[in-house]
Amino acid sequence: MRKYTALLLTLFLVFSPSARVFALAASPAQSAEMVRTALLQAQIALADDPSAAQKQLDLAKSTYVADLMAPVRAANAQADARVMAGLVDAQQALTHQDALAFAAARAQIWTAILFGSYTAVDNAVQHSDAPTAQAWLLLREFRTATRFSRPGVDATLAVARLMTKASVPADVLLAVRADLLDTYQARLNEVLGDLVNANDKQYAMRRAEHAALAEGYFALLASAYGAQRGAAAQQTAQQAFTQLRMAALHSQDITQALATVQTNLHNFRAAPLSDAEKVRRAGQLLRYLSLVPVEYGRGVVDGHVNRTLEIQEAITFRDGAAAAFADLQNLLDDRDGQRTAAVEKSLATLETQLLATLAQTQIAPPAAIQTQADQIVTNLKTIMPTEWQTTNASGDFDVINSMLDQMEKATLAGQYDLAESARLEAYALLEVGPEARLMVFAPQLKIRLEDLFWNGTGDPKGLAYLIGQHAPAQEIKTSRAALKTALSEAQTLLSGSSAPTAVATNAGVIVFREGLEAVLILASLLSSFKRAEEQKYRRPLWMGGLLALFATVLTWVAAHGVLMSLARYGERLEAIVSLIAIGVLLLITNWFFHKVYWTGWIANFHAKKKRLISGEAGLLLGLIMLGFTSVYREGFETVLFLQALVLESGTGVVLTGVAIALAVVALIGVITFKLQSNLPYKKMLIYTGVMIGAVLLVMVGNTVHVLQVVGWLPIHVIPGVTVPTWMSTWFGLFATWEGIGLQIASATFVIGSYYWAEHLTHRSRPQSSQANRRTTKAVQPVHTH
């Protein structure tokens, strides 16, 4: 009977005058929205004005038949049949004033139209029909935007590439399917969550609508489900969704039906993740988990909730971790089902603990939350492949944006101290993660990001400045929007495929520079030993150097945790360290440009050596420490420089560059130590001194800029002067009076001290000569006959 009713309805609508009114619909998306709106208006009018409801239903019917029925039927007969059946059900529900049935029919119609649109896009791409694909792609849904997921536009970009023939249809088809299937699976999960809430609150109409939506979304995913699990499993899952819809429609208990649906969906993913997406989601999962105990520890003090907002943030980060885990769960389950189940259970327990603390019914100690999070991370790292555990820039940017969302939320609540804390954490994540590659691939963005994060005085102003001034939330929001744009640009630029080569090269340059300096210093110490002393006194120096290399490796292992704990201090820590480094460089450079450096400085090392040799006590230890300190200073600096690259691109990529550079340094070292005392150390140190002088000027410029960024120095821009970004990046030149002025002052100090030392040397020479003559005359021997 239902089949004949649908046939009569179709014939009536095709030949009715009202159908021809919509024959010139602008696009499938516009027509579909008219159907959706008309059905919603009919639902609203159903109880109070049945005649108005009927008019809106007729409008929905005629619009679908005139504009959408033929192309949907041609693309997907099953989808069209679902729409027509839904229209029949809607008419019967209106006749019987059954609001629940009408809500379910409305949901069925809409999801069936989406199903037809999905198939139309798929068919058009397979036939290289880009205009048709583009037109039907507008008729789609997007996953709900959250702090942890943004609406995907991969399908839109892929079809645009098809339009310009920049991609072949096969590649475009994969991108379209991945985007749309991922979207509709996300919508299915959201609807099932809404269904649980509606059931808990006894909202009968919403329960019926959400159950029907769930069935409709699964119809979109059913073929992917069948491809992965077989036809029998697909049929069983479809029956489970039908039973869920019928139970909700008839106001029955849906608990068992919902559990069956969720069991069927367990570990199902319609669109398999790409390798890059796996790494990205894994990075998000580990990052968010690490932030849960941090936020919780700030919110709970001495067994009491001190800051509710921090507990809410801990819950939000737990939810973000759970979302990332859900995306990876089926893959993790295949690797270790027992541990994956343990992670799932632990995440649920963590949620219970956090919610209880928020409600203040039972407040867990921060140490317990830390232990729980650590246990989850330990299990995950045991299950995850090694490549998933490499820090990923995309995941880092997601977390950075999450922290900035927290900052905005805190400013809206007037809690500027929490806003500043969130801002610092966001910058710390940028600094220990993407910034290393940012300096390689997009140095032009570093200055802009620093200004927006810190004390930029342009338009818009920096977030640190605004938070410090307790600026209005709207002004902070404006700066945040500009920062979000800059971060998005940086993320796009960092997605280049040439990253590993460039990062390895950068690491190699760092190691070569520091290693060469260590070789030069150690060689100068070893070269003056007499051959008779070689076996006795050279060995402790070598031992100290080898211990320094071992200590460098240990520092490498420990550096990640140490740097992460210090990273929250961001540019302030960099400013302090840079000031110390400048002080040391000024001293060293001054020595280099004085004759006392290449005589007195090396003599100082040799004097230490002689004092050590002349004494029996502590001889071995002293020589070991001398070799150790000479090498470890360079090793420690190298570890600090390389750690950010490791955090971003992984140990393997960085160690490739390190290994090549070490091989070159070792070769130079062998040649150097073989030549020993024949090397022109004086000239070599002079050349090195000139290089360190140049490094000093660059460091002064960069340090002044950092001090200005953190607000410790004023900013006075030089009018009409523009310094190219590459000069700022490589030479520390910035168009401010403070930066240029202090660089000139540093150069003046070094060069001036050189000429002053030369002046003093020339003055002392005549006096020394006269004294020598007097001494010679006084000691002339007396000749007796």
Image (cartoon, rainbow, N blue to C red):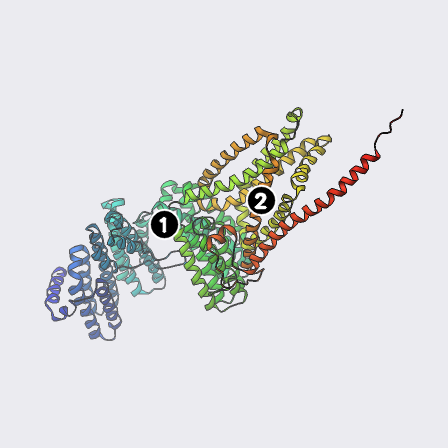
Q: Name the element at disc 2.
A: helix
Mark 2 and mark 1 in contact? Answer it, CB < 8 Å: no
- Label 2, on which residue? 690
Q: Where is residue 687 in the image (x, y as percent from the top left)?
A: 57, 41
**Type of residue at label 2?**
Val
Disc 2 residue crowd, few under 14, some 14–19, many 20+, Cα 10 Å: some
Q: Which of 181 and 121 is in front in this view?
A: 121
Q: Which of 441 and 363 is in front in this view?
A: 441
Distance from label 2 to label 1 (Cα)? 55 Å
Q: Name the element at disc 1.
A: helix
Q: Is residue 731 above or below residue 675?
A: below
Viewer can see residue 454? yes
Q: Where is residue 507 in the image (x, y as percent from the top left)?
A: 48, 42
The answer to whether residue 544 is left or right of residue 396 is right
Asked which quadrant contains residue 184, the reply is: bottom left
- Label 1, on which residue? 327
> Image quadrant for the C terminus?
top right
Q: Residue at x 33, y 47 (%)?
A: 273
| Badge nearest the viewer, 2 or 1 | 2
Viewer can see residue 355? no
Q: Which residue is drawn at 33% across and 48% down?
A: 266
Q: Which residue is drawn at 60% across and 39% down?
A: 685
Numbered tag placed on residue 563 in the rendering: none
Q: Residue extending furthest front? A: 785
Q: Where is residue 656 in the image (x, y as percent from the top left)?
A: 45, 38
**Type of residue at label 1?**
Asp
The answer to whether residue 138 is left or right of residue 510 is left
Q: Which of 273 and 442 is in front in this view?
A: 442
Q: Nearer the viewer, residue 605 or 32?
A: 605
